[in-house]
Image (tube, grey):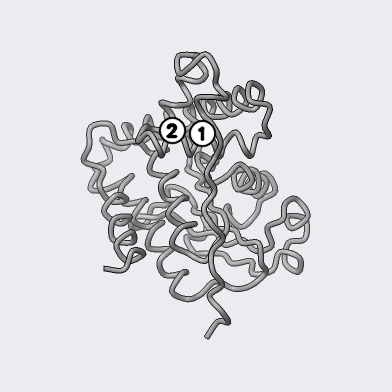
Amino acid sequence: MDGSIKMLAETFLQLVDNTVDDFDPIGLSTMLCGRCVDLLDVSQAAVALVDTDGALQVVAGSSEQAIRLAQFQLDTEGPSLEAFRSSHPVFHDDLNSTWPQAANTAPLQSLHAFPMRARDQAVGTLNLFRTQPRAMWDTDVTVAQTFADAAAIALLQDRAISALHQLTVQLQGALKSRIVIEQAKGTIAERASVSMDEAYARLLAYARNHHTKLTSVAEAIVARTLTADIGTAIGTSRRPPARASRGAMP
């Protein structure tokens, strides 16, 4: 079986499996971001989930850069909010022509926001970024929206109204975890004398390589229980090789 097809199938299984006792919204969101970068023709990805006040909050990203741009568009009423409110994907194939304010904030030239929805309820947005200003392939659009919907189903699957309070608690926990992750990034950046981008990349790599939840690693770093030398423990991030060009769109 082709590796990408196998990973695609595994991703769907992971997205819809919320039967485990320690179901982790922020872990699911982080996994979703990583798989979008691995499987789709995109450079970065970020996820925003709705909080108890009905506002979107960025909870995960494939990089620090993706988190910053996702937060920027939330702060400036960008495509993520539009996709969330309309329950339809929003495409900005060329930010220089459609949203130059965003294009000037980072070397990301296109932005596509997909609502994370289950039935008639939206729980967040999946944001995909690219370094080149061009449209997404139709197949990638279909997969991205299906990923977003599958993640939403995992958050809301077959739950009665009385069970929604537990979901709210989980989402609030995800937002609190985001704070711990930010603190851990700062600790790594300071102790290892690296940028926040590199600190986040190291944090992701350590959690992945040790099969440990991102939040658990962050908590250990903040509590200083992971190691006395955080730079040595985290090491250096391993960045994947550049993706081969797919050629011209059909």
Q: Residue at x 65, y 34 (%)?
A: 196
Q: Position of residue 80 (x, y in %)?
A: 57, 54
Q: Earlier in the sequence, mark 1 or mark 2?
A: 1
Please identify the quarter of the rendering in which residue 79 is found.
bottom right
Whole-angstrom CA distance, mark 1 to mark 2, is: 7 Å
Is residue 142 shown above or below 155? Answer: below
Q: On the rendered structure, is 12 left or right of 136?
A: left
Number of labelled discs? 2
Q: Residues within 10 Å of mark 1 (few under 14, many from 20)?
A: many
Q: Residue at x 42, y 28 (%)?
A: 173
Return the residue at label 1. Answer: 203
Residue type at numbered disc 1: Leu
Q: Residue at x 43, y 44 (%)?
A: 29
Return the residue at label 2. Answer: 214
Q: Secondary structure at mark 2?
A: helix
Q: Position of residue 118 (x, y in %)?
A: 34, 55
Quick check: marks 1 and 2 in contact, CB under 8 Å?
yes
Q: Position of residue 153 (x, y in %)?
A: 31, 51
Is residue 197 shown above or below 127? Answer: above
